[in-house]
Structure formats: C-alpha cells, structure tokens
Amino acid sequence: MRNKYVLILFSLSVYFNFFSLTPVLQAQCVPASLIKVTVPVPLPACNPGDCTDLLAVYNIPKQTNDYAVSTIGYCPSFPFTGGTVINATGDDVWSSTVNLPFSVCFYGVNYNRVLVGTNGVVTFDLAGQTPGGYCNWPFTATIPNPGFAIRNAIYGVYQDTDIRIPPVTNYAIQNVNYYVLDTGVNAAPNRVFVANFNELPQYSCGTAVGFQTSQIVIHETTNIIDIVVSKRTSCTGWNSGSGLIGVQNQAGTLARVPPGRNTGTWSATNEAWRFTPIGPNTTVSLAWLENGTPIGTTNPINVCPSATGPNLYTAVVTYTRCDGSTVSVQDDIIVDIAPPLPLNNPHDIIICTPNPPPYTVDINENADILLGVPNPADYLIKYYEDQNDAINDTPTNINLISDAPLATFLVPVVPKTIYVRLEDFVTTGCFNVRSFIIDATASPSGTFLYPATPYCNSITTPQPITPTALTSGGTYSSMPAGLILNASTGAVTPSGSTVGTYLVTYNIVASANCPAYSTTANVEIKICTCTVVASSAAETLCVNTALNPITYTVAGGAVSASVTAGTLPPGISGSFSGGVYTLSGIPTSSGVYNFTVSVDSSTDVCTAATTITVNPNVTITLSSAATTANQTVCINAAITSITYSITNGGTGANIVGLPTGVSGSYLGGVFTITGIPTQSGTFNYLITTSGGCSTASLGGTITVNPNATIVLTSAPATANQTLCINTAIANIIYTIGSGGTGAAVIGLPTGISGSYSGGLFTMTGIPTQSGTFNYAVTTSGGCSTASLGGTITVNPNVTIALSSAPSTTSQTLCINTAIAPITYAITNAGILGGTVSGLPTGVSGSYSGGVFTISGSPTQSGTFNYLI
C-alpha cells in the first residue's frame, strides 16, 4: 500500500498532494490531506541573470456531490476522550445543538451545526431531529433508504449502545464526547470536529460482548470524513444485532458504505475508513509574489532573482469553500544567486620577450585553480576562447580547447583573453566563467631613487620612491639592517630607523615566462641639528581664495629651501629670499595637499611637514525629478515636493519668492520645498546656499492657478424668469473665468439649452414644457468647479371648456324668462378668469373658482351671439 501511495504522490505532486502531509505513524496509515502549499527548493540560479523554475505543490479538494470510500489503516490521530461529554442520565439521546466554528459541506449542502447521537451517529438534519431529544435506535434496513429514521448523517458505528450509569462504571472514560481541534497541523483552515463513542456497553448485551469504541472525524475545507473503529461486536440478541458504517444524504437516495459494513451483524477491530469527496474540482487559484508584488499565476513559474536581493518569492493558493467564503495559504522561499564556486581565480600570464607573436604558452592552470580545494574531483574545468561558448558549453562544446593543446597553446596576437568554465557537477550543478589574459612585455627593467635623501631621523611620515619605467611585481629589501622599509612600495620611514646609509634592492623573481631582475638605490638617514620654524603647519581655505602666506626659517639662517615631497595645490608656489622660504598664491583646485619643505642651513638639512586643505565652493543641484522645479498646480492643492542637494560644505539655504502656504526647509544636506499654495499667480523662487565656501543659487517657477469662477453677466432679472409656454426666454449669460474652459447646465425645461463659447455660457430657447425649473450651471476645466443657478417658471396656456349641458349654449326663450345657467371651466387663467360680450340686457357673466357662469333673465328680445 505504501509503495503504491508513494508513486501516486510523486506523479501528481504538482497539484494533488492529496494524501500524507502529516507524519505517518504506521506504514499502512494515510493521514487526511491538508490545505497547504509547499514550494520545494528549486534548481539554483548560479550566476547573475540566471533564472529558475518555482513549483507550487498543493491539493485541489473535490466537491461533495458524492464520496469514495477507502480503507486507511488503523492509526488514531485524535484522542477518544475530552471535550464536551453528553450527559449520561438518559440513553438514546441527541446532544444539544453543536455550533461548528467552520462550515462543512455534506452532499453538496453547507452546514455549520450538527447533532451528536449517543448511538454512534452525527447528523446535519436539525429540522428532522430534536436537539437534546430522542436518538432513534431501532433499525434493520440498509442504506440508501428514503425511509431511514436518521438521514443526512454520518454513521460510525451506528448501533444501540447504552451510556447510562450503570451499565457504565467509569463515566470519565466511558462516554460520548465531542470537540474541535484547532492547533498544530490541525489549525485553521485544517481544523477537525471529532465525535467519540468510547468504551460503551451494548444495550441488552451490556458488557457481554465487550465495550464498543469508535470515532467520527470531519475535516475543515477538504470535507473529508474519517471513521475509526477500535472495537465493534454485534449484540445479536437485540435489534437484530444491527450495526452500520457509512454516510447518507438528506433524501435517503444516496449513500456510501464500506464493503461489508452496511446494516448487519458484522464485527470489527482496529479498522478505519475514509469518505473522500469525488465531485468536480472546487475552485482553487494560485498567485505568485516577488517581494510582495504579484508576478504571475502559472505553475511552475520562471523567476530571475536579482544579484543584490532581496529575492523572497511567495506562492499564495486561495480556496473557495462551499459557503462561498475563501481561505488562502502560502509558502515563502528565498531564491538567491548561488555564491561563487570556492575555487581560486586563474592568474594572468605575462610573457617577457622582445620578440613579436605568435607565442607558444602552457595555459593549463588547473593546479592553481584547485589549490587548497578539499574536494577537487567534484569540479570540471574547461578552457574556451569565446565567452559565450564558455557559458553555453553543452551540448556542442563549440571552440573548446581540449586538454592536449593546453600545454602548447598558440597565441597569435596579444593581449589574448582565455575563458575558464568552472563547474560543480556533484553538489549544485552550478558553473562560473572566469577569465585570464595572456600578454607580452619587455623583460623587467627600470630604476628608482629617493628624491629627498638624506632624510632627517625626526621625519615620522613614510618617504616614497620616485620610479622611472620600473616594472611592477617585485619586492624591496635593504642592507644593512636597521632601515624601516615597506617591502611592497619601497617607502622608508626615517623616524625609528638607525642613522646610516642603506642600499635598497628591488627584486623581481623569475617566472615560467620571465627572467629575474633587480635594481638598487641608496638612501641616507641622518641626525638633523637644525629645526624648521614654520608660521603654520596646516591651512584651510576656499578655492580661488588667497592663501595666508606660510614662511619657513631655521636658526642661524637658511641658504636654500624647496618642497621635496608631496604636492602643492595648483596656484600655490614657493619663493626663497633673505633666508626665508615663503609659500603663497591662490589655489585653483580643491583637495587635501600634504607636502614636505626641506630647508638647508649650510651645515644641515631639516624638514617640516605641512598640509593645505582647499575646500571647494558650495554646490546646489536639483535632486528631485526635473519636472518638479517648474510646476503648475491648482490653488489649495499640494505641490510635488522639490528637493535640492547642497554639497561641498554648505550648511543651509534660504529661499525667496514662494506663494503663501509653500515653504522650504533644510536637513542633512537636502533643501526641500513643500506645501499647499493658498495664493494664485506665477511665483519665481530662488534658493541661495549658506555656509561653506562662496554661495550658490538655483530656482524655478511655481504657477498656481485659481479656481474657476462663474458670474452672471446678463441682467440680474434674467437669472429668474417667468414666462408663458412656447415663448422665448430672455437670454441668460454667465461669464466663465480663472481657467474654466467650459460649463454644463442641468434642470432646464424642454426647448431651452445652453452653450459655451469664448468664456461665455449662454442659455436660450423657447420652452415647450410648463412648470418651475431650478437650473444649475457648473464650470468645467481649470481648477475646481463653480456653480450658479436660477429659476425659470413656464406658465401653461389658458383653456376654456363648456361644463354645463351642451344644449345650454343655444337657448330660445321668452323675454323676461330666466335662461338655463351656462357654465364654462377655465384653467390657467389666474384670478381674473375671463369676460363675456354679446349678451342680451338682463343676462351677465361672472367668474369664480375656475368656473365662468352666464345667468339672468333677458329684458331684450332678439338673437344674441356671445363670446367669452
């Protein structure tokens, strides 16, 4: 079983690490898969610019439409005791409602509450079963079964156990208990709900068939269900000896049962079963981060770590659970460029010859490269004439210099570069490409001298040589003993050396391609009785500023003097007159200049060391983006910070010309301009340094645009108008200023519109809709927006309609007889209503409340056509 499992794990390790992610206790055990992601250590990135593949290993759970049953070996991972214990005062009971801290999907439905029954069952059916109520024990039917008493349940082992005291004798151990484990590998999102049925007697049989022990485990996120059975023995004399292991849906139409474990009289010891969802894949997504920044979603992903780091890569796997929530797990890995191989660098080969090329040279440096390496057999060394060939190497080994020609390599021209590929083919598989140069030179030659010899033994600073065409690479020695000499540079230190004359020898030893060479020079160390009196041993001044003259004298008078070591600043020179040596002038280049002045008193020579420090002028340069120096912003909007770097001794700066609300500050060599301008206009600012040598200035321009404005420029009365429908309004005109480039209007009646041109927004038109219209004009463009508005009231036309009987409009009657009243409904006419003409004497019209009424008794005969 183990071998088969290992093969499956290897072949599906990219995504389906679905089995052992926790330590295996026994060979046959298969712990439940965990929600996690692992990034194995990749192949190394050997050189800067190299890339490597990262692989995320994670599982993809299945949906719970159905389950597959498998045996997993008896390896209980969780205790059979602890947690909440169901009260033992009664038998055949359900627990109170158990609220789970995580959701469980069971047969495609999401649940977060369960009931635990004392007869070895857990149900999600809180509607069909009563919390704290009766847990059914009689059953003989197998599942699936729509008529089964307890459905939507996990049976493990479902049988009629008895939790009462007695027959239970040790209630602390013999009980039904449940708990949630949220720690270690079983911390969220891998928590488990565990229900235990521990050492329980069978009903009727009591202890005659032994104690019954089993466990139900529900896993978070994966929704895997485990049933562990320590002991189940059938009580055949009661309830037909029925026992059941399995799962069944709410309808009783789907169920999964291990072989031989459906309802029956079977017995079992030390076995375990797993119910694994086998529906479609759940939704799982992968994202890769590099130092916290997303870089892709592929698996594997190719990454190219930086040579300077950091190179922290994170695989984030997000699982969508059946309740729609998501949970993410991640794994980090640092991928750095592998360190250089622990091998010596090849050395340049210099051929000493007066002859032109070609040359024949032994270029095999394997012994030198591997010198001191503890495991030289782990490395492969190859020589190439082309760098790309050395990098690419396999499979063609183009232009590889084979072993045989290494000892007699022909060099047609110099200098010639040889590239060495060094490969660790045992440990890391990494390679480095290093190079050396083959060159030719004349045989060693040249001379050297000590320019200021003799030296006073009071001089404490090393005195250098002056070489002439001297070949480098040799060492210095002296005779007799007593001289303090630097063997690499030839410099002597008079102070501490024995007074006397020394022969200093420069020696180059012979090599495979060059002869030995040596040359000599004399140096004298003496006791000096004179003492130089210098007006100053050190001066500090600004460049292009006159030096305060430095004078050198000796007691009894000097006959000559000069600078014998070191360098004077450009622009400074010495002159000797009247026994005094004077340095003066204007330095034109900054720097620190150390030099020695030797003074001859006719009987002795003595020296004085002097330092002149020439400080450069202060500089100021823009250090923020070039566009920041000159920027345009809106009033009351923050400017982009402007920074200037002040160097060469500047200690501060001042600024003028800023708008109100913007200011500058100096800190640690940086002058920063920030703020929010509250004043519009064009502001040319200037920064001037302070401290150090001279001053420097730089400036720029900040343009602050005001907020856009809007002003009514037509007559004030036009903003609020009342007119009749289908009558042209008086034009309403607004001026848009301060950078506004347009405007828009809302709230106009149909037939009225606005347009922008040349800074003016004009509303015109004939309203075809009556009502009261509150309009608002809002600017666009420029800084911010501004609005103004008004009201256009559009009155509808007056209407009149006969409201009395149609026959009343044409009446024939006798004089002095009252007419039948004639009424008209008048709308939109205000308080006047209307007037009438053409009536006979004695008949009149009147208006009231929207009704015009004609009534009266005519005292005049005739035919009268009236008009209202």
Image (spheres, helix red, strand yellow):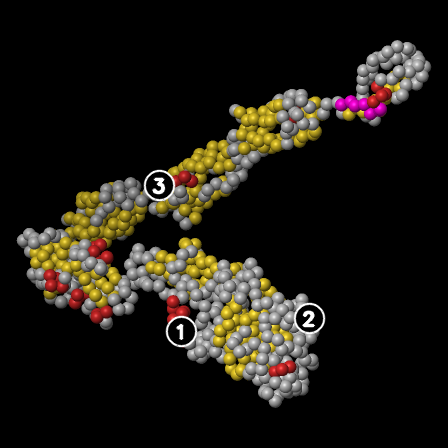
Distance between the alpha carbons at the discs numbered 3 and 1: 84 Å
Q: Is residue 554 above or below residue 824?
A: below
Residue 130: numbered disc: 2
Was residue 801 drawn as part of the magenta stretch in this picture?
Answer: yes
Whichever of callouts 2 and 1 sits on the residue coming sooner in the sequence is 1
Could you tell me which residue is drawn at 59 percent across and 67 percent down?
Answer: 253
Residue 524, visible in the rendered structure: no
Quadrant of image for the C terminus: top right
Task: Give residue 694's mark.
Answer: 3
Count of marks overlaid on the render: 3
Binning the other alpha carbons within 10 Å of mark 2 as few (below 14), some (14 to 19) or many (20 upward) gives some
The nearer-to-camera label among 3 and 2 is 2
* Quarter of the image with the N terminus in it: bottom left
Q: Is residue 384 above or below residue 809?
A: below
Element type where label 1 sits in the image: helix
**On screen, 21 above or below 643?**
below
Q: Can you tell which of label 2 and label 1 is closer to the viewer?
A: 1
**Amino acid bearing label 2:** Thr
SS for dot 3: loop
Q: Is residue 820 visible?
A: yes
Please tell me in which quadrant of the rendered image residue 837 appears: top right
Amino acid type at image mark 1:
Lys
Q: Earlier in the sequence, mark 3 or mark 2?
A: 2
Q: CA distance from mark 2 to mark 1?
A: 45 Å
Q: How far is the residue under mark 3 from the one under mark 2?
A: 94 Å
- Horizontal and vertical percent position of residue 48: 30, 57
Residue labelled with disc 1: 4
Task: Give the magenta part as a residue range.
Answer: 799-805
Residue at the spot 89% in from the left edge and 16% down from the top edge: 812
Residue 252: where, in percent of width, then height? 61, 68
Callout 2 secondary element:
loop
